[in-house]
């Protein structure tokens, strides 16, 4: 499995752990894991790199079902599924807060924001063709007379 686990997703790595230790890693009914279980896995299994093991455990411990199972006083389990400590009050509160923040984010995404009425586009500027027509038709009574100044160019005398 050494060559197969390299570059795998956290879910695939977790499946590897659940196949090797089904008593501890059950995706359908997760139980709180012993604190420091990664050291036990490292001693028994050298196939996963530290990064792969970290990603697999992170994927497992961030699942909503796992966080919901972290109640204060609940038994933690080791790799064999035997009790190995209890969940502290602080861990339970942290897990519940994380679950609540996830729910709030989901509610925020699900509720549509109030629709803003589209504003009317600004009125287009009048075209300048009227000015040009008036310039060309100076005989008309409403015509506009535009005076322009010619630029003089001076030539330097050749010496």
Image (cartoon, rainbow, N blue to C red):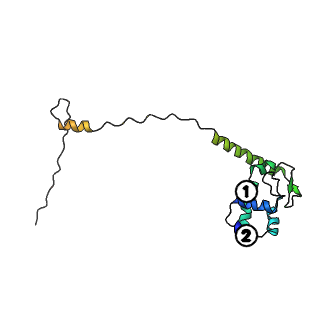
Image quadrant in which you'd find residue 10:
bottom right
Secondary structure beneath label 1: helix
Q: Which mark, residue 74?
A: none
Image quadrant in which you'd find residue 19:
bottom right
Q: Which mark, residue 2?
A: 2
**CA–CA distance in space, label 2 to label 1:** 20 Å
Query: x%, y% of residue 4?
Result: 70, 67
Which residue position is annotated with label 1?
Answer: 59
Q: Residues within 10 Å of mark 2 (few under 14, many from 20)?
A: few
Query: x%, y% of residue 137?
Result: 17, 35
Tags 2 and 1 touching, CB below 8 Å: no
Secondary structure beneath label 2: helix
Q: Residue at x 84, y 52 (%)?
A: 88
Query: x%, y% of residue 78?
Result: 85, 60
Q: Residue furthest top?
A: 141
Q: Is residue 7 left or right of residue 74?
A: left
Q: Residue at x 15, y 52 (%)?
A: 152
Which one is in front, 136 or 8? 8
Q: Residue furthest right?
A: 83
Query: x%, y% of residue 151?
Result: 17, 50
**In the rendered image of this protein, does residue 133 appear above or below residue 53?**
above
Picture quarter with the N terminus? bottom right
Q: Residue at x 86, y 57 (%)?
A: 77
Which one is in front, 2 or 141? 2
Picture quarter with the C terminus? bottom left
Q: Nearer the viewer, mark 2 or mark 1?
A: 2
Q: Residues within 10 Å of mark 1 (few under 14, many from 20)?
A: some
Q: Earlier in the sequence, mark 2 or mark 1?
A: 2
**In the rendered image of this protein, does residue 80 appear above or below residue 142?**
below
């Amino acid at each position: 499995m050494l060559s197969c686990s390299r570059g795998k997703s956290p879910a695939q790595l977790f499946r590897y752990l659940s196949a090797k230790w089904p008593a501890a890693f059950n995706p359908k009914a997760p139980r709180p894991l012993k604190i420091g279980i990664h050291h036990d896995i490292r001693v028994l299994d050298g196939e996963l790199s530290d990064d792969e093991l970290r990603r697999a455990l992170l994927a497992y411990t961030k699942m909503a079902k796992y966080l919901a199972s972290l109640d204060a006083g609940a038994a933690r389990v080791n790799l064999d599924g035997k009790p190995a400590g209890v969940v502290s009050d602080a861990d339970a509160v942290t897990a519940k807060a994380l679950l609540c923040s996830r729910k709030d984010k989901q509610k925020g995404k699900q509720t549509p924001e109030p629709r803003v009425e589209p504003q009317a586009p600004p009125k287009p500027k009048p075209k300048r063709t009227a000015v040009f027509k008036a310039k060309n038709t100076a005989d008309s009574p409403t015509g506009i007379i535009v005076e322009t100044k010619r630029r003089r160019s001076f030539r330097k005398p050749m010496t």
